[in-house]
Amino acid sequence: MMKKTVSEKSMMQKNKKNKDDRSLKNNRFLITINILGSVGPIRFVVNEKDLVSVVIDTALKSYAREGRLPVLGSDVNNFLLYCENYAESALSPMEAIGSHGARNFVLCKKQKQPLKTEGRSEMISQKRSGWKSWLNKSFSFKIISH
């Protein structure tokens, strides 16, 4: 049996580390986030296992760093992230961004609902609306999804 020298062992460890690094890089991908009311999308690289809440936070920080308008704020809990292809419901903040295989997203600010008071007859609407319905209401046109 032939003994391996120290340099051969370190070379094998380096090769293994390089393979591990490459596999980590393979789990990263570029996403595009369109923000309602903004002039253009934000693009950045994420790891497929990053949580949706982390992605929202990164998008808000990038948006603010670029000095974009309108000013959105930085509270992740005030925003919803939708897949452009599956806009029926928002992504859960605790799920992995890569779980849907999507690369294009829409970031929306949550709609604030009026509180019901004793003296008023206002009803609180419990209906959650997605970004498509917001566009339909705002611009009075229909977006047809297939």
Image (cartoon, helix red, strand yellow):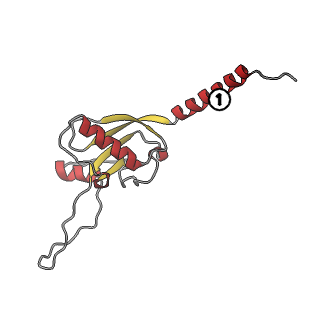
Q: Taking 16 as reference, is 36 above or below it? A: below
Closer to the camera in the image, 61 or 123:
61
The residue at the point 29 percent across, 43 percent down is: 60
- Amino acid at pointer 1: Lys
- Compared with residue 114, is residue 67 higher up or lower down, i.e. above or below? above
Q: Residue at x 16, y 72 (%)?
A: 122
Q: Callout 1: few (<14), some (14-19), or many (20+) C-alpha neighbours within 10 Å?
A: few
Q: Position of residue 7 (x, y in %)?
A: 70, 20
Q: Residue farthest to the left?
A: 119
| Left or right of residue 131, residue 8 in this image | right
Q: Position of residue 71 (x, y in %)?
A: 19, 44
- Whether residue 85 is visible, yes or no, is no
Q: Position of residue 57 (x, y in %)?
A: 34, 45
Q: Residue at x 38, y 44 (%)?
A: 55
Residue at left 21%, top 64%?
113
Decide if residue 52 is on the left or right side of residue 41.
right
Expressed as whole percent of the image width and height from the top left, the position of residue 56 reads 34, 46
In this rendering, does residue 66 appear at all?
Answer: yes
In the image, is residue 20 above or below residue 107?
above
Q: Nearer the viewer, residue 5 or 93?
A: 5
Q: Vertically, is 127 above or below 118?
A: above
- Residue 13 figure quarter: top right
Find residue 127 and report its image quarter.
Answer: bottom left
Q: What residue would you read off at disc 1? A: 16
